[in-house]
Each structure stands twice: as structure tokens, then as C-alpha cells.
């Protein structure tokens, strides 16, 4: 009968407090792991998800707003560019691909984004990956009133090929602002786990010429997505200088990843606070291990005395208590992975709905190693307090008469 | 070599008022290998204290205790624990079974601190004390007499050289007492263990060839007496 067997017996004898303490460890562990995983994954997703572009060219405004608007389809559009701006940058020898986009309408809260077919035919949103159309669908005809629906929108609104949609004016859904045109869905995009899943793509001219839009600005575009030629960091700098320093009408937001990273740096304190809270909860949970074992020491003095009388060394008794603390934490951390999956699935669905960024609840994070190790280690350390008490238990005194 | 050799053993407790209360002073005591000796003494005469000293559960103030040739005071605490686990079997006045463990587990637990777990021998011992159909019972599911038998089996589990029995029949009726006592004596004989039994029960003591009066070997001297 090993020490583990004694530990097991003791946990069984205190099933209720073992469960409660284990649960508090599980909650704390799950919180700790989720905070880290969400932080790391969202950071990686938002700074890595460039949609395959290096830069955004838009009207003079904050770079962050341009990126959020043009890449993530969030926020208001800061203003418009002329189509001629597009023709100009398209001719730049350092630009591999330039895609104009126009926004200003929505369908039931999901943005309609006007663009050109090259967005799908040429742009690689990730190395080797192009936006593909599901099944028998196809890319819209740039001259027709046709729509290509992002996978998330299609799923959410139940849109499929052949459906007819009626756009509404503005980026925010308002039932009274229905346009008179209708668009026919000609395809649904395969999920790309990028913000492209969250919008409805229509031909550029569609947005520009929608009834009720000012005919004066009919050839305006909202922004230009730019992919530079490979190895053209210097080109990026040159374009940046040209548009941002020499010109004053437009802003060249480059590089996209870095701009998003700056956003994360600005809100890094939120992460810190969350981490701090998670650490504190972890400490509280560990303290509860200490308290629950310590409280049981009184009723266990006799048992310890008996074990000692049977020949158990002080060190063995000490180890039993430490192992017990570690075992409770270990069991709790096992359970915490289930809680973690639950939390992550919830968070992922919220983040996806809000931003189109997809978090992976099953992705591995180093926190999944160090959090369990940390919690078990810390609990074992907390176990030292009752273990010392157990270590000191006087044998003769506690072999008392009551049998 | 004797199973047990004692000389000049002293133990004094402090009363709640802080006054010294000498309980044990044994000048000389010896128990030969495989011998069985009973000590008779009244309640409060220090019998349990005496056995606890021998078992190394209590530390003597002075004196020598030699068990199977090894002197206790020369050993470190963990060596004494080891000696207790391997060489001594103790049947406690209050059984001291572990409540969370079955009969079999109680016996196995005794083994785990000693030479090692031997399931078959543990089962054989429990069968020997008539509990082969109670292996998975917990102490609270047993009668007092049955609990006493488990304690007997556990004390013999590590094939000790010396078995200490503290009032082993104190909680039993006469018929049971006779049976359990017979069992202890037989199993000690079978396992070649010396037996030191303490009791105040004439009935019990009647079964022993060798009965010694505890007060004849133990002369604690109070400070007041010493001053006289
Ligand atoms: N820890 C202690 N502190 C102070 N006095 C003690 C302590 N343990 C025992 N004594 C005293 O030592 C004396 C002997 O106690 P002990 O338990 O050895 O008696 P006993 O002979 O086993 O009695 P019984 O037959 O009732 O079991 C008692 O007077 C008791 O009050
Ligand atoms: Mg006694």
C-alpha cells in the first residue's frame, strides 16, 4: 500500500471538501488559461490576419481606423477617395495588387462591400489560399446586381444561392432605409476564418451607383487594399513617405500587422488587469486547498498517530499531506480543461460574431503546461502548512482511548 | 538473544499543575525469545506507558531498552520507526484500527511500513483469526470482538519478534476474551514471536504460566517519597 493509496483514502473520506476545493482550483485554472489563450490568440489573429494585404490607402485619417474599417469591416469609414487615386497607385511598380473597396450599405446589419473580381481571383488571404466559392456558386458579374455572401453571414441569415436581397442604406441596419435595388446571391464563400466571412460582397459599381447615393461621388471608393511586391519593405517606406509626409489628402496605413499591434499595446493594461485577477483567483483557490486540509487535521490527528504507531515515518506523513494537496490541485486542473473548452467556445463565438476573427478553443498554448504545473506546485507548497502540523503530531497523546 | 531487555527505565509525566509525576521506574526486565509473559497491574499503574516506551512511541527520560539486540536510544527517530514497523507488533488497548480502511487494508497498511505488502499472508492471518468472510468490511461494520481480531492480525502481519498486547480483552465478554486471548497466544507461538501482555483481568491472566505483578518490577518514586 503506497503513500498514494493513503492519499486516495483520505480524499475519499473527505469527498465533499475534496470536490469543492477541486472545483475552485478548476475554475481558477480555467480562468487563468482562458485569459492567456484569448489574449494570445486574439493578438495573433488581429495582428496576423491581414487578409493578404500589406497596406491600406484611404483618406487622411488615423491609420488604425483605416485598417479596422477596410480590413476588419469595423468602425465608420473615415471618408472617400477618388477612383483616380486607385488608378494611380495601381500603376506603382512596387504594388503587386491593389483592390478598391466601397462601403456604405448593409443587409440586416451585415456590411455590403463593393469590390472588383480580382479580390477573389487574385488575392491570397493566406499563403497559397484564395477565397473560394462553395459548390456551384460563382463570383459576381461586375456589371450585374449580384452578391457573393461571406460564409458567416450566409450561415447566420440562412442565405443561399438564388436568394434575393434588398440592401439598406448606411452601415447600421435601419428598416426605414431600404434601397429599391435588389441583388441576387450567386454564391457563398468557403469559410476563410477572416473578416471576409462577415460581409456580403457586391460589384464596386453597385455601391457607387446605389439609388439615393450622391451622383457626384458615384465614382468614389472607401479605401484601397494594397499588396506590395515581395521584399519591398523599402517600397512601403517610400509610399508611406509619399502619401503621409508629402501629401496631406491621403493616409497610407502600413504595415497592417504593426498598426494592429500598436492597438494591442495601447490596451495592454486590460490584459495586465485580467492576468492579475486570474493570478489572484489562482492564489485564492490554492489557499482554499490549504484551508480545507488544515481544517481536517484535527479529526485526522488520531489517524496520523495510528499510522506513526504502525511505523510510518514523520517524513511519510508529511509527504502524504503534500501529495494530498497536489492531488486535489491535479484533479481540479484536469477538470479545468473541460471548463476551459466551455469558456473558449463561448468567447470564440462572441469574437467571431463581432469581428469575424476565429479563435480555436482546441489550440495548444504553453499556458496549458505552466498553469497546471503552477497550480499543482503552488498547492503542494500550500500543503506545507498542514503538513508541518501533521509532521508534529504527537503519537502517544493522540492514540487516545476513543475507538 | 532476548526479545526484550530493559534496565533502569525512567518515565516521569508532568501533572497539569506542573508537578513531576513519576510513572515508570523499571530497574530490570527481560523477555526471552518466543516467551510469553503477562504483567498484571491496576488501572493507572503505568502499563500502557510501559508498552509505549518499549514500542518507541514514548521517549524515556532515562534507561535502556533493547529489542532483538538493538538499543532503542542509540537509534534515530526514523530508525526507531523502522524498528517498530519491522520488529514489534502492538495490539492497542483501543485497537486503533483506521476507520477508512477495510479489514484487509488495515492489515496491509501495517505491512506497507514494514518489510512490504504480502497480500496472501494478510489474508491467511485474517483467516486464522476467523475473519476470512469479512475482508472488505470496515471497522464500523464489525463487532468489538471482530475489531480486536483485526488488530491481532495486523500486529502479527510483519512477523514481529515481539508482540505487545495492551489489555487485549478489555472490551470483550468472557467467552470472547478467552477465545481472542487463545488466538493471540497461538498465533504468537506459530509466528515465533515473544509476547508481552498487560492486563488487570484475573481471568485473562489465569491462562498464562508466567504472570508477573507489574508493581514488583515497576517502582516509580515520587519526589515526596524520595525526600523521605
Ligand atoms: N501524557 C500524560 N501526561 C501526564 N500524565 C500521564 C500521561 N499519560 C499517562 N499519564 C499518567 O500516567 C499514569 C499511567 O497511565 P497509563 O495509561 O500507563 O495507565 P494504565 O496502567 O495503562 O491504566 P489502564 O489499566 O487504565 O489502562 C496515569 O496516572 C496517567 O494519569
Ligand atoms: Mg492502559
Image (spheres, coloured by chain):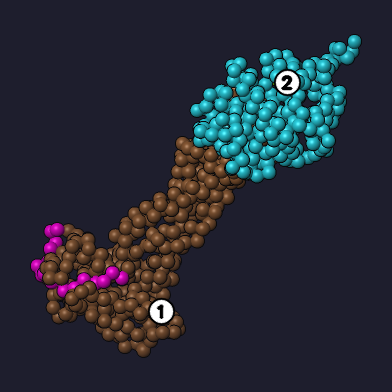
Chain colours: A brown, B cyan
Residue drawn at the location 14% of the way across and 61% of the way down: A177
Q: Which residues are magenta?
A: A175-192
Where B50 falls versus A135 (above or below)? above
Which residue is tagged 1? A240
Please, which chain is the residue tagged with disc 2 on? B
Image quadrant containing the N terminus of chain A = top right
Label 1 near ligand 1 (CB < 8 Å) = no
Work out which residue is located at the far right of the displayed protein and give it. B228
Q: Secondary structure at mark 2?
A: loop
- Above or below for B48 versus A324: above
The spot of residue A352 in percent (x, y) is 31, 61
Find residue A241 and report its image quarter.
bottom left
Q: Position of residue A393 (x, y in %)?
A: 66, 33
In the image, is residue B121 part of the stretch drawn in magenta? no
Residue B169 picture quarter: top right
Q: Which residue corresponds to the image point at 33% horizontal and 77% vertical from the top-left?
A: A129
Residue A308, image x, y percentages: 67, 35
Image coords of residue B105 (percent x, y): 56, 38
Q: State how many labels appear.
A: 2
**Chain on which label 1 sits:** A
Amino acid at each position: 500500500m503506497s503513500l498514494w493509496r493513503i492519499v486516495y483514502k483520505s480524499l475519499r473520506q473527505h469527498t465533499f471538501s475534496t470536490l469543492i476545493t477541486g472545483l475552485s482550483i478548476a475554475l481558477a485554472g480555467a480562468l487563468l488559461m482562458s485569459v492567456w489563450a484569448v489574449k494570445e490568440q486574439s493578438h495573433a489573429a488581429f495582428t496576423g490576419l491581414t487578409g493578404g494585404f500589406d497596406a491600406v490607402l484611404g483618406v487622411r485619417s488615423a491609420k488604425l481606423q483605416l485598417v479596422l474599417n477596410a480590413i476588419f469591416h469595423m468602425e465608420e469609414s473615415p471618408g472617400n477617395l477618388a477612383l483616380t487615386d486607385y488608378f494611380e497607385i495601381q500603376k506603382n511598380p512596387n504594388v503587386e495588387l491593389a483592390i478598391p473597396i466601397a462601403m456604405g450599405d448593409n443587409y440586416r446589419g451585415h456590411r455590403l462591400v463593393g469590390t472588383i473580381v480580382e479580390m477573389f481571383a487574385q488575392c491570397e488571404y493566406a499563403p497559397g489560399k484564395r477565397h473560394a466559392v462553395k459548390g456551384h456558386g460563382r463570383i459576381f458579374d461586375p456589371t450585374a446586381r449580384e452578391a457573393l455572401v461571406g460564409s458567416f453571414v450566409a450561415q447566420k441569415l440562412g442565405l443561399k444561392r438564388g436568394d434575393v436581397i434588398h440592401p439598406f442604406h448606411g452601415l447600421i441596419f435601419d428598416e426605414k432605409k431600404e434601397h429599391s435595388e435588389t441583388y441576387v446571391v450567386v454564391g457563398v464563400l468557403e469559410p476563410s476564418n477572416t473578416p471576409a466571412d462577415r460581409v456580403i460582397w457586391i460589384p464596386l459599381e453597385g455601391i457607387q451607383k446605389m439609388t439615393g447615393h450622391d451622383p457626384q461621388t458615384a465614382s468614389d471608393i472607401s479605401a484601397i487594399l494594397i499588396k506590395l511586391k515581395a521584399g519591398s519593405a523599402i517600397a512601403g517606406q517610400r509610399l508611406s513617405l509619399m502619401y503621409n509626409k508629402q501629401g496631406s489628402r491621403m493616409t497610407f496605413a502600413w504595415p497592417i500587422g504593426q498598426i494592429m499591434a500598436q492597438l494591442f499595446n495601447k490596451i495592454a493594461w486590460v490584459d495586465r488587469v485580467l492576468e492579475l485577477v486570474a493570478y489572484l483567483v489562482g492564489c485564492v483557490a490554492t489557499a482554499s486547498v490549504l484551508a480545507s486540509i488544515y481544517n481536517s487535521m484535527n479529526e485526522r490527528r488520531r489517524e496520523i498517530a495510528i499510522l506513526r504507531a504502525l511505523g510510518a515515518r514523520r517524513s511519510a506523513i508529511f509527504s502524504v499531506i503534500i501529495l494530498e494537496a497536489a492531488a486535489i490541485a491535479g484533479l481540479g486542473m484536469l477538470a479545468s480543461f473541460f471548463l476551459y473548452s466551455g469558456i473558449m467556445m463561448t468567447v470564440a463565438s462572441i469574437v467571431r460574431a463581432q469581428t469575424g476573427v476565429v479563435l480555436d478553443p482546441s489550440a495548444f498554448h504553453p499556458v496549458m503546461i505552466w498553469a497546471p504545473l503552477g497550480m499543482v506546485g503552488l498547492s503542494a507548497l500550500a500543503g506545507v502548512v498542514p503538513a508541518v502540523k501533521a509532521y508534529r503530531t504527537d503519537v502517544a497523546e493522540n492514540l487516545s482511548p476513543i475507538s | 538473544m532476548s526479545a526484550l531487555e530493559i534496565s533502569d527505565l525512567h518515565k516521569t509525566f508532568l501533572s497539569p499543575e506542573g508537578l513531576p509525576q513519576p510513572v515508570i521506574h523499571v530497574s530490570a526486565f527481560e523477555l526471552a525469545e518466543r516467551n510469553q509473559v503477562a504483567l498484571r497491574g491496576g488501572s493507572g499503574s503505568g502499563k500502557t506507558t510501559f508498552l509505549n516506551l518499549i514500542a518507541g512511541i514514548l521517549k524515556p527520560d532515562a534507561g535502556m531498552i533493547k529489542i532483538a539486540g538493538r538499543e532503542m536510544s542509540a537509534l534515530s527517530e526514523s530508525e526507531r520507526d523502522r524498528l517498530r514497523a519491522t520488529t514489534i507488533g502492538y495490539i492497542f488497548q483501543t485497537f486503533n484500527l483506521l476507520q477508512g480502511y477495510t479489514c484487509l487494508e488495515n492489515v496491509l497498511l501495517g505491512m506497507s511500513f514494514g518489510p512490504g505488502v504480502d497480500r496472501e499472508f494478510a489474508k491467511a492471518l485474517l483467516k486464522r483469526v476467523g475473519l476470512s468472510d469479512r475482508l472488505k468490511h470496515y471497522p464500523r461494520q464489525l463487532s468489538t470482538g471482530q475489531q480486536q481480531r483485526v488488530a491481532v492480525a495486523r500486529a502479527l502481519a510483519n512477523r514481529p519478534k515481539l508482540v505487545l498486547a495492551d489489555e487485549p480483552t478489555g472490551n470483550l465478554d468472557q467467552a470472547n476474551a478467552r477465545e481472542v486471548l487463545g488466538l493471540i497466544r497461538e498465533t504468537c507461538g506459530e509466528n515465533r514471536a515473544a509476547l508481552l501482555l498487560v492486563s488487570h483481568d484475573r481471568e485473562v491472566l489465569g491462562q498464562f504460566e508466567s504472570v508477573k505483578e507489574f508493581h514488583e518490577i515497576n517502582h516509580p518514586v515520587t519526589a515526596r517519597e524520595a525526600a523521605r
